[in-house]
Amino acid sequence: MATTVTRKGQVTVPKRIRNALGINPGTQVAFEVNKDGEVVLRKASRTHRKFKRDRFEAARGRADVKYRTDDLMALLRGE
């Protein structure tokens, strides 16, 4: 099954392969080269990640704010 590389170095993973690996939008994948020089595409696990999670993504949903936006704005403005 062949695909074409774009100018940006991107490829489309064929639907049959995405379905077989359970790859959905947002799924991280890992490319590896085996001992025979073949490229292997895998669904990335946490152990395959080489980059830290985005600090904002890591903090998303963790705030424990008891004030409403209007209350916070009034507090910040000194009202």
Image (spheres, rainbow, N blue to C red):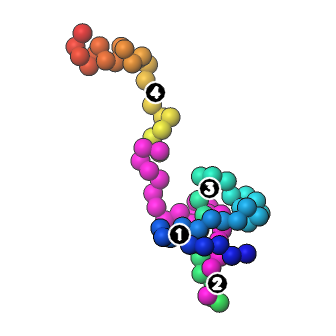
Q: Name the residue under label 3.
A: 27
Given this view, does label 4 or label 1 mark the residue nearer the observer? 1
Q: Name the residue under label 2.
A: 38
- Count of numbered circles in the view: 4
Mark 4 touches mark 3? (CB < 8 Å): no
Q: Nearer the viewer, mark 4 or mark 2?
A: 2
Q: Which residue is drawn at the image coordinates 73% and 58% (left, top)?
A: 22
**Quarter of the C terminus within the rendering:** top left
Q: Is residue 41 magenta?
A: yes
CA gap, disc 2 to disc 3?
A: 22 Å
Above or below, comparing residue 39 to residue 15 in the picture: below
User: As drawn, is 59 to the left or to the right of 70?
Assistant: right
Tag 1: residue type? Thr
Mark 4 or mark 3: whose residue is earlier in sequence: 3
Residue 55 can be seen, yes or no? yes
Q: In the drawing, does residue 66 fall left or right of residue 15?
A: left
Q: Are marks 2 and 3 in contact (CB under 8 Å)?
A: no
